[in-house]
Image: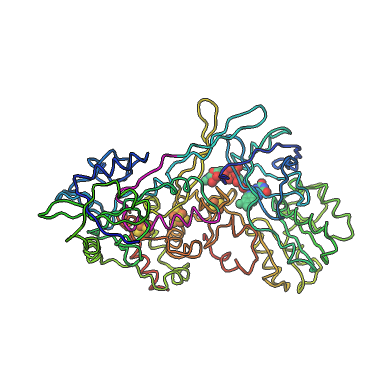
Amino acid sequence: MNDPWVPTPMTVREVVRETADTVTLTLDTSASPFAFAPGQFNMVYLFGQGEVPISISGHADRPDELVHTIRGVGPVTRPMLDLVPGDVLGIRGPFGTAWPVEEARGTDVIVVAGGIGLAPLRPMIYHLLANRRDYARIVLIYGARQPDQMLFVDELHHWRGRFDLTVEVTVDQGTEDWFGPVGVVTRSLARARFDADDATVVTCGPEVMMRFVVHEAVRMGVPQDRIWASMERNMKCAIGLCGHCQWGPDFVCKQGPVYRWDHIAHRFAEKEL
Amino acid sequence: MHNPRTILSHSDLGTLFATLHAEGRHTIGPTVRDGAIVYDRLIGPDDLPTGVVDEQAPGRYRLRHEGTRRFSWSVGPQSFKRWLHPPELRLFRATRTERGFAVEKPEAPPPLALIGARACELAAMAIQDRVFLGDVVDPHYASRRRDLFIVAVQCDRAASTCFCPSMGSGPRVSRGYDLSLTEVVDEAGHRFVVEIGSEAGRALAAKLPLHAATTDADAPERASAEAEAQIARRMPTDGLREKLLGAVASSNWDDVASRCIGCANCTLVCPTCFCTTVDDVTTLDGTHERVRRWDSCFHPDFSYLHGAGPVRSSVGARYRQWLTHKLATWHDQFGTSGCVGCGRCVAWCPAGIDIVAEAERLAEDA
Ligand SMILES: Cc1cc2nc3c(=O)[nH]c(=O)nc-3n(C[C@H](O)[C@H](O)[C@H](O)COP(=O)(O)OP(=O)(O)OC[C@H]3O[C@@H](n4cnc5c(N)ncnc54)[C@H](O)[C@@H]3O)c2cc1C
Ligand code: SF4
Ligand code: SF4
Ligand code: FES
């Protein structure tokens, strides 16, 4: 029987250091193509250390590679910063719900990311750009705590250079060599030009950030059922068996992590649920 | 299936064990240890409790000697959960290879026979079946469950903590068993009325020295009626799911929190709680094992998120998760209540917190 608890070993092909505490790992899946939908995640097992949920940050049209962007924060993720090409990780997945690439067709798409939250949104952005004609305006708003904590900097520059995409990058705290905007993403959102009646908003970041983003989007006139957010909960299995990710009636690993806002608005407001 | 009831004499209990052993099964059943009845591997009928009855109340469990019966007690701190969903289980072993690692899965356990499973135990198993054999199948539970042989026991006595009738789970065992036993002790002797619940049960019964039940044929129904007559505790199940979902902000949660010490006993004794965590253990020879262990929503770490800490940081929020999951959101997830009314969480709570009383107060509030 196929054992859903056992990871498949996959070899690291490339390591890119994004920031002092974040790396992007590309795993080789050419031997057995890895299909996923933007927004989904894997359980990533580091030999002898443990296993953690990590979103897929690569291109869904490239099944020969699997890309994860990992911030080292604790006993499992920190040693992942030291991986080199040729090292092996265990993978289980993909799991969870996806960004609304279909539902968003024909609308303005507003992508609002905070911190590491840009990683799960990158496959969505890739999809939007690869199918550019299917969408109206595309706006990317990205907030990082400080300039040196921004992910995918080269790519952000490249996207900014495109005429068919608006990119707004902001930091909470500026530094001497930062000349961009300082402030929260909600301010950039309020200034962004899009058709609120016919827009799709997708957001991922800390819960407080998402709360303010949704509040602002709704204030601007975006209907609640056109807003999607990705939730984070403690996850030990990702297959609905360990119980850790429960949020009201849901297992976030199955019914989430990507939720349509009108489905969770009431629950999001409850403390410690 | 026409099932004439038959009699197994008490002195032939050993044959039941031997017949199950001959099929290569380990026999798991009740035995007395440290002042409580627990389920463990039994060699033969001598390991069963003899003349032991239990007294239970909120925060209280005592055994005392009375009579000669083997099964005249209700439930102890353990359920058969630990044999199908073990408290600790190796998911795999990983050994380092030149660049990576190789994974080795654990061996399948031997087939088991459960002896003395009561109605609430079977109801709990049916609930865990929905958890572990749903759209994702847990291979560990499945392999233990698939080959199981169940010798049920009809309760003839209930504890003050029992409330199976209001949960629709007992006291009568009516399905999900292979053989069931009803214990009868009178001037005519000590014996068991045997009911057959499955083809496997029928095949096994054919190998036992059974004789026809004449006057005893209605003993199972009489036992159930006797047990049920002793049960006063009732869960207010009417509209309970909706009421509890409406009680998210009730001040009762803070009230429980002032009594609950967050020990997690209730989740550990509960026959349906399924939550686990995983640990990575390094053995001396350099291999790594990934071990799955029972966990509890009462542990603050259960909902820990890096940077934010526990989502449910207060005891009140954790009690709310436990009770709301059991009695409300379980319906959304698995189409059934998560409670079978076994009363274990009531008896084994050191603070004597009573899930029925709490549910009543919350339901009134709503
Ligand atoms: C769906 C999803 C997608 C995600 N995607 C990404 C992503 O793309 N990139 C990314 O970088 N991150 C992502 N995360 C977050 C990532 O999973 C966590 O950062 C990671 O689990 C941290 O694990 P750790 O063991 O390294 O550190 P810690 O979170 O510190 O973990 C330590 C372990 O100990 C336990 N613990 C309990 N209490 C404490 C305590 N007081 N102190 C420390 N540990 C405690 C925790 O349960 C945990 O298992 C995602 C999370 C989810 C749910
Ligand atoms: S919640 Fe309590 S009474 Fe209900 S099944 Fe669990 S332990 Fe038994
Ligand atoms: S009550 Fe708590 S420990 Fe039991 S299954 Fe629910 S979340 Fe898990
Ligand atoms: S992560 Fe285990 S149930 Fe969702």
Residue B251 in view, yes or no:
yes
**Residue shown at 55% from the left, 45% from the top:** A1
Render colour scheme: rainbow
In the image, B321 versus A65, the foreground residue is A65
Residue B55 visible in the current orientation:
no
Position of the N terminus of chain B by quadrant: bottom left
**Region of the chain picked out in magenta, as a range:** B109-135
Position in image of residue B230 (x %, y %): 22, 64
Q: Quadrant of residue B366?
A: bottom left
- Residue B122 colored in magenta in the image: yes
Instruction: Pick out the residue farthest to the left.
Output: B187
Front residue of B46 and A262: B46
Residue B225 spot, x, y in % from top left? 23, 65
Q: Residue at x 65, y 41 (%)?
A: A72
What residue sits 55% from the left and 56% below the top? B135
Picture coordinates of residue B249, whole percent (x, y):
47, 68
Q: Position of residue B323 (x, y in %)?
A: 42, 61
Does the stretch in magenta take in B298? no
Reply above or below: B252 against B106. below
Residue B255 sits above or below residue A126 on the image: below
Give left or right: position of A58 versus B42: right
